[in-house]
Image (cartoon, rainbow, N blue to C red):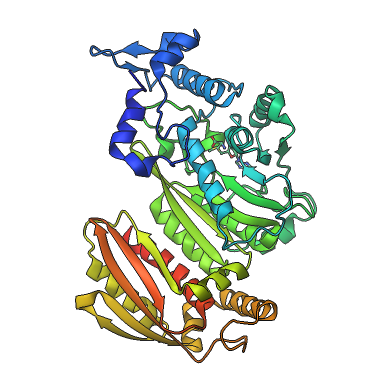
């Protein structure tokens, strides 16, 4: 008999959405019976239902901690432990975030400016006593990490977890976040507008050293404003101290600080990423990212049993010229809108597409019967649809591209007068729509790409 009831439940309900296809547990949920027979320290926590199904008491911290210890040991060769009460990670869920980052790094759109660097370098903000992301990232993918934290217990325990794994220890540095000294006022000025009550410890700025370059950062932030709000799920016991779970202003304040730091650090990171606990915050944070002129925003959903978390990623790296080139040949773009709320239909999505383009002044001719809209947008309309900085990036990019290729458009390096394209909406299965954009002329594919990304994020925020 395979797996615990909770893992089984997740697979039935969330099925393909709940677990990344490359996740070790995607096809093989943990086999509690086997693990109990192999590991005497785990066996006292495993019990069997009348029909012989093995499970553990998810409300017992000792049981969940043993399970994490055994899974890390058995499936990843990692020696791991945390003190009583510290946040205990679930291995399959944390692996999903690692694999999502792996997907982001593989995207051509945000090019790797250090393709010859031998090791991918990540920064785990708030690595915790459990140090789970560096341990998983190093053992699964050979990535190197800086893991930061502020509390002594987290720093000491994370270091012990690293030292107990000599095969990957060289890949992981645990870094203490120190209070600002002289430059703090400058920081505060930079961050004016961010919730000021947030404690004054830095997050990235002042922790990342001069000249350091990372492929990505990741963060499982303190989600809550109070420990009561954390309300720790009575159905499971994963521990979690106030220092780990709570910060003034909650995740919104914490992530806003990461965003403001990223505005300063810009291309020191190829991708900035974080988990978000509340969908409402995801929308606000995405809008904030648009305001600060990022070149791309990506989101994903992590389904964890009954709860949902979101992944938010952004970058300041200009979109790849390779991608512009590739879309010269292939002028269709598309994305899937999955998990559309029941109250919305394809018509609602079509109308929103129309409002999106009309708001920038573009002319739209919709054919509701065919679920299509034909759009004409001048460069001024495109300017209005994108923020100025994204547009500048595009122009710089298109200039650079025109210098390195000879067969693109008319070689004028600028947008031709009008962009003509068609957006079509196709129903796939209930709750899922395919949105396709087809350019009606050969030029300006890069511009359509940027607008299309913006449209994707707007529709996702509204309908999913
Ligand atoms: C929710 S825990 C995440 C722990 C671990 N990464 C995980 O996923 O289980 C948040 C962590 O952020 C740390 N933290 C809080 N403020 C921080 C800051 N300014 N810089 C770095 N870490 C911080 C906390 O001490 C805590 O360990």
Q: Is residue 385 left or right of residue 355?
A: right
Q: Most extreme residue toward the left, as rendered?
A: 369
Q: Residue at 54%, 70% (x, y): give it.
A: 326
**Residue 320, can we see it?**
no
Question: So how many labels did they put on this image?
Answer: 0
Residue ranking furthest to the bottom: 417
Q: Which quadrant of the figure has residue 60? A: top left
Q: Residue 353: which quarter of the image?
A: bottom left
Q: Residue at x 79, y 55 (%)?
A: 211
Q: Nearer the viewer, residue 57 or 338?
A: 338
Residue 450 in the image, given as x and y percentages of width and height: 50, 72
Location of residue 367 in the rendering, given as x and y in whole percent from the top left corner: 24, 81
* 254 w.r.t. 331: above or below: above
| 361 w.r.t. 205: above or below | below
Seen in the image, is 239 located left or right of residue 118? left
**236 displayed left or right of 80:** left
Q: Position of residue 390 (x, y in %)?
A: 57, 74
The quadrant in which residue 315 appears is bottom right
Residue 300 seen in render: yes
Q: Which quadrant is the N terminus positioned in?
A: top left
Task: Name above or below for residue 112 compared with residue 411.
Answer: above
Front residue of this view, candidates 187 and 260: 260
Residue in the foreground of this view, choosing between 245 and 216: 216
Left or right: where does residue 164 sit relative to residue 409?
right
Horizontal and vertical percent for residue 412? 62, 89
């Amino acid at each position: 008999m395979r797996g615990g009831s909770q893992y089984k439940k997740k697979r039935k309900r969330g099925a393909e959405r709940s677990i990344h296809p490359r996740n070790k547990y995607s096809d093989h949920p943990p086999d509690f019976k086997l693990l109990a027979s192999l590991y005497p320290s785990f066996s006292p926590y495993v019990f069997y239902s009348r029909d012989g199904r093995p499970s553990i008491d998810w409300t017992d911290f000792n049981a969940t901690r043993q399970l994490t210890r055994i899974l890390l040991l058995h499936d990843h060769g990692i020696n791991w432990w945390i003190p009583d009460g510290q946040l205990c990670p679930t291995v399959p869920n944390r692996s999903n975030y690692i694999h999502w980052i792996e997907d982001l790094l593989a995207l051509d759109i945000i090019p790797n400016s250090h393709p010859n660097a031998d090791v991918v370098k990540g920064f785990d903000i708030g690595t915790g006593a459990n140090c789970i992301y560096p341990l998983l990232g190093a053992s699964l993918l050979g990535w190197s990490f800086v893991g930061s934290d502020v509390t002594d217990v987290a720093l000491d325990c994370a270091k012990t977890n690293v030292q107990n794994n000599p095969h990957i220890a060289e890949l992981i540095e645990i870094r203490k976040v120190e209070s600002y000294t002289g430059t703090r006022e400058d920081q505060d000025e930079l961050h004016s507008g961010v919730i000021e009550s947030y404690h004054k410890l830095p997050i990235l700025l002042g922790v990342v050293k001069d000249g350091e370059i990372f492929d990505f950062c990741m963060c499982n932030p303190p989600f809550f404003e109070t420990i009561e709000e954390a309300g720790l799920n009575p159905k499971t016991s994963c521990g979690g101290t106030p220092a780990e779970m709570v910060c003034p202003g909650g995740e919104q304040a914490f992530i806003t600080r990461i965003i403001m730091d990223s505005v300063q650090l810009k291309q020191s990171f190829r991708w900035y990423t974080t988990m978000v606990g509340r969908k409402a915050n995801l929308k606000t944070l995405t809008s904030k990212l648009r305001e600060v002129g990022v070149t791309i925003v990506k989101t994903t959903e992590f389904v964890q049993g009954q709860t949902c978390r979101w992944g938010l990623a952004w970058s300041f790296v200009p979109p790849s010229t390779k991608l512009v080139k590739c879309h010269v040949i292939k002028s269709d773009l598309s994305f899937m809108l999955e998990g559309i709320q029941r109250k919305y239909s394809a018509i609602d999505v079509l109308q929103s597409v129309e409002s999106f383009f009309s708001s920038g002044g573009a002319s739209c001719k919709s054919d509701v019967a065919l679920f299509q809209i034909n759009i004409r947008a001048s460069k001024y309309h495109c300017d209005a649809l994108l923020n100025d900085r994204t547009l500048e990036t595009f122009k710089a990019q298109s200039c650079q591209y025109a210098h390195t290729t000879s067969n693109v458009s008319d070689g004028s390096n600028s947008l031709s007068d009008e962009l003509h394209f068609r957006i079509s909406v196709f129903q796939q299965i209930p709750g899922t729509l395919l949105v396709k954009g087809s350019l009606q002329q050969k030029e300006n594919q890069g511009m359509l790409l940027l607008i299309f990304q913006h449209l994707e994020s707007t529709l996702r925020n509204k309908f999913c």
